Image (cartoon, helix red, strand yellow):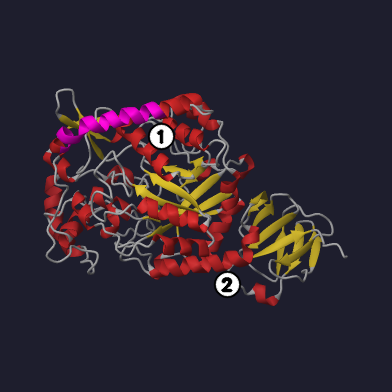
């Protein structure tokens, strides 16, 4: 997930600008000892194992290039020829207009709830500084743990914390050898997600460091060649299909923090964000270990890698990220998505989100009036994405397009070992958050954070089961519903059945009476879902006043009403 730019609250609007800028040396010197004293010592299991010595991939970037670059680029050329042939013959082309012509699958619109599994190398540390009122991003730990930030930065103390808990000699890529997932049990996790009412699962399979949680032939930086020696994507995809859940793949598709690029003279330079090329430096050995240098970042690596994934794992959803750095028409997004669509055409319905990349000026002219931006989010995609309100200004139910909120029951994107039950949404708060999203025509991609060994924290597990219990009772007002004006008020959220024969009111603020403002036909009966006895109602100028039973007047958690024509008597 992109950290900081638009998601921090309480006045932290400049987090991204502050985030990755090191402070002046004299300022750092003054704050170093203070930071070391302030940052916590992590409990065992979240710090360097006793007697463990740092291990990196055994070959240097130069050795990997000499041994594997030519063969890898030759294989990439064959994969590109295959991809280009499929797209040339297929219905969908690698253009923005063709992406726009692809319909969002009905199953996605009906699903309403998915699970986002935030788990990767960062989970071993499971930490970032706590900032009151802000969304936290432990899943950027790898990038920030080696940077000294000044006081006032939301990332102040990260380097001190890392050295205190992992050691000065422990570098970013040393986490790879420790990433084993000893308690990661895909069937049990998917069983839990099914019990909570989710209809699709999207695990983080390649975050911005480029470490892949699948068997990827275009890198040695994956969980099969290193660390766990396991294909986690295969495990999750098979578990999902066994349970009848759709399988999605989060991939940081349009870029990585660093990537080695082979020059014509055989030397290596480094690709960085926004297509910057910088000289090789020795620290790249522990920032890009296991990566195979290629000449063309997009056609030798990004497109072959992701389309190979499509061939091997046949995902139902592609969930792109890292869309703020490169233009969509240059980064391979359209090629990959066209391939996804064409492979699936006539066989199954698939979906891709809106994080294609930066937009041409003409594509977004007049689009973002409140907050200027350059991306294609909420402009192009089978479904649009919102991350804790960062695109809310563009999600108008009256101009509905399928969309999805990726947000968590926790304040953190990534596990945080200091998280307490108070930092996790209550059942009531979650149901209100979820119902508000559905009432505006969205899905919720609920973020869950696994611990270093792949287990879900107890408090999050308990909340998922509570969610499942609520949906088992009131899911009729959620699944396969559509929007109904006035959509959402402080007290009530509205939905309707696809056929329009029933309306639903999710009551968030119960009282002795609640007034329903949606259109209601004469003679309609109102019942609490799960009960047969119609409630007493009274028409008023403001709508239909419903008298609630005492048990619901005092309800702690929202409940749902069904509004339907009376059933005919046999």
Residue 364 in view (yes/no) = yes
Query: Is 559 left or right of 212, judged from the image as shown?
Result: right
Verify whether residue 367 appears in magenta: no
Residue at the image position 40 percent from the left and 49 percent from the top: 7
Q: Residues within 10 Å of mark 1 (few under 14, many from 20)?
A: many
Which SS class for mark 1?
Answer: loop
Question: Which residue appears at 63% of the width and 55% of the height?
Answer: 489
Position of residue 204 relative to residue 550, above or below, is: above
Q: Which mark identifies residue 122?
A: none
Residue range corresponding to the magenta coloring: 64-82
Q: Residue 308's spot in the image, x, y percent?
A: 37, 38
Percent position (x, y) of residue 78?
Answer: 34, 28
Q: Would you say 23 lies left or right of 523 here? A: left
Q: Depth check: give the residue in front, 452 or 535.
A: 452
Percent of width and height locating residue 482: 65, 49
Which quarter of the figure has residue 219?
top left
Q: Main secondary structure of the magenta part?
A: helix
Give the residue pinned by disc 2: 556
The kind of secondary structure element at disc 2 is loop
Camera-side mark, 2 or 1: 1
Depth check, front residue: 36 or 440: 440
The tally of labels here is: 2
Taking the spot 17% from the left edge, 47% from the top edge, the residue there is: 57
Picture quarter containing residue 423? Answer: bottom left
| Nearer-N-terminus badge (2/1) | 1
Tell me the residue that label 1 is attached to. 357
Q: Residue at x 56, y 61 (%)?
A: 432
Where in the figure is residue 421, as x and y percent of width and height? 40, 70
On-image quarter of the C terminus: bottom right
């Amino acid at each position: 997930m992109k950290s900081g730019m638009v998601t921090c609250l309480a006045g932290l609007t400049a987090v991204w600008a502050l985030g990755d800028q090191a402070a002046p040396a004299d300022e750092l010197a003054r704050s170093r000892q203070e930071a070391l004293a302030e940052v916590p010592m992590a409990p065992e299991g979240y710090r360097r194992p006793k007697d463990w010595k740092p291990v990196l991939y055994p070959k240097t970037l130069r050795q990997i290039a000499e041994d594997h670059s030519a063969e890898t680029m030759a294989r990439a050329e064959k994969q590109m020829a295959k991809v280009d042939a499929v797209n040339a013959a297929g219905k969908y082309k690698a253009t923005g207009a063709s992406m726009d012509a692809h319909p969002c699958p009905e199953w996605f619109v009906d699903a309403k709830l998915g699970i986002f599994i935030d788990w990767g190398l960062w989970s071993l540390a499971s930490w970032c500084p706590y900032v009151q009122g802000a969304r936290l991003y432990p899943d950027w730990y790898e990038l920030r743990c080696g940077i000294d930030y000044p006081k006032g930065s939301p990332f102040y103390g990260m380097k001190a914390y890392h050295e205190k808990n992992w050691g000065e000699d422990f570098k970013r890529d040393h986490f790879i050898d420790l990433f084993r997932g000893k308690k990661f049990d895909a069937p049990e996790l998917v069983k839990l997600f099914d019990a909570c009412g989710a209809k699709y699962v999207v695990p983080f399979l390649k975050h911005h460091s480029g470490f892949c949680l699948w068997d990827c032939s275009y890198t040695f930086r994956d969980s099969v060649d290193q660390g766990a020696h396991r294909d986690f994507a295969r495990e999750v995809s098979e578990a999902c299909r066994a349970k009848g859940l759709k399988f999605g793949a989060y991939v940081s598709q349009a870029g990585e923090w660093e990537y080695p690029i082979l020059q014509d003279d055989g030397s290596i330079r480094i690709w960085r964000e926004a297509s910057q090329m910088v000289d090789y430096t020795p620290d790249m050995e522990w920032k890009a270990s296991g990566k195979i240098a290629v000449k063309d970042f997009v056609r030798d690596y990004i497109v072959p890698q992701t389309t190979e994934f499509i061939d091997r794992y046949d995902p139902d959803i592609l969930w792109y990220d890292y869309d703020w750095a490169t233009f969509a028409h240059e980064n391979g997004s359209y090629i990959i998505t066209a391939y996804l669509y064409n492979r699936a055409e006539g066989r199954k319905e698939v979906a891709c989100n809106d994080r294609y990349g930066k937009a041409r000026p003409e594509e977004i002219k007049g689009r973002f009036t409140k907050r200027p931006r350059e991306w294609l989010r909420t402009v192009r995609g089978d479904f649009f994405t919102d991350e804790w309100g960062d695109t809310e200004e563009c999600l108008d139910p009256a101009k509905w397009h399928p969309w999805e909120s990726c947000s968590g029951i926790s304040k953190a994107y990534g596990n945080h070992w200091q998280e307490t039950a108070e930092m996790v949404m209550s059942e009531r708060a979650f149901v209100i958050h979820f119902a508000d999203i559905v009432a505006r025509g969205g899905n919720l991609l609920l973020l869950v954070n696994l611990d270093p060994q792949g287990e879900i924290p107890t408090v999050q597990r308990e909340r998922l089961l509570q969610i499942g219990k609520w949906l088992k009772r009131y899911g009729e007002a959620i699944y396969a519903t559509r929007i109904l004006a006035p959509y959402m008020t402080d007290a009530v959220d509205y939905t309707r059945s696809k056929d329009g024969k029933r309306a639903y009111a999710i009551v968030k603020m119960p009282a002795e009476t609640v007034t329903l403002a949606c259109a209601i036909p004469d003679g309609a009966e109102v019942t609490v879902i799960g009960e047969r006895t119609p409630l007493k109602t009274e028409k008023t100028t403001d709508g239909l006043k419903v008298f609630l039973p005492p048990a619901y007047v005092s309800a702690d958690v929202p409940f749902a009403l069904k509004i339907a024509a009376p059933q005919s008597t046999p």
